[in-house]
Image (cartoon, rainbow, N blue to C red):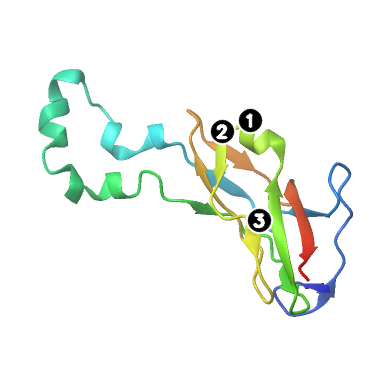
């Protein structure tokens, strides 16, 4: 089992403190926008709602309403054939920031890029190097 960076060089990850696994950090600053900030809801009042909903299936803003945001970590897995990784998000992201994780499992040669949807009312700002979760390596028999 090895962890690689985006250039294919071997890197070491810090052991997680709260779970049996490794800390996953961001490789760049990220802003995850709230669904409330979607252009569909800008300047809308209750009297305009029926008119606004007409043809809502074709509305490009609504199609992007719950589009997941990819968080780049720059970590690629290099695992044995019978291994895979499970990503568990940090509890602050899920409880305080109201972020919902879309993808949990990662296989061999995959880059750890978790996808989140913001169900909160505010934008979430995450800084480069902040811990976003724990990667646990599972071996199947």
The residue singled out by tag 2 in the image is: 98
In this rendering, position of residue 1 left or right of residue 38: right
What's the CA distance linking mark 1 and mark 2? 5 Å
Q: Residue furthest front?
A: 141
The residue singled out by tag 3 in the image is: 28
What's the CA distance linking mark 2 and mark 3? 20 Å
Q: Residue at x 41, y 50 (%)?
A: 67
Q: Does 121 appear above or below 108? A: above
Give coordinates of residue 53: x percent, y percent: 16, 35
Q: Residue at x 56, y 39 (%)?
A: 99
Q: Are marks 1 and 2 in contact (CB under 8 Å)?
A: yes
The residue singled out by tag 1 in the image is: 95
Quick one: label 2, few (<14), some, or many (20+) residues within 10 Å? some
What's the CA distance linking mark 1 and mark 3? 22 Å
In what element is the residue under mark 1? helix
Rendered image quadrant of residue 140: bottom right
Task: Please state which of residues 80 and 109 is positioned toward the viewer in this rendering.
Answer: 80
In what element is the residue under mark 3? loop
């Amino acid at each position: 089992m090895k962890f690689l960076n985006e250039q294919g060089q071997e890197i070491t990850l810090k052991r997680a403190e709260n779970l049996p696994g490794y800390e996953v950090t961001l490789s760049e600053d990220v802003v995850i926008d709230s669904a409330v900030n979607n252009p569909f809801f800008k300047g809308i009042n209750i009297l305009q709602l029926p008119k606004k909903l007409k043809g809502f299936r074709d509305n490009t803003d609504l199609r992007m309403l719950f589009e997941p945001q990819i968080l780049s970590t720059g970590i690629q897995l290099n695992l044995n054939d019978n291994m895979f990784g499970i990503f568990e998000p940090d509890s602050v992201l899920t409880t305080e920031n109201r972020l919902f994780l879309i993808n949990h499992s990662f296989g061999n040669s995959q880059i750890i890029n978790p996808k989140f949807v913001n169900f909160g009312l505010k934008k979430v700002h995450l800084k480069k190097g902040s811990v976003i979760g724990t990667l646990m390596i599972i071996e199947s028999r």
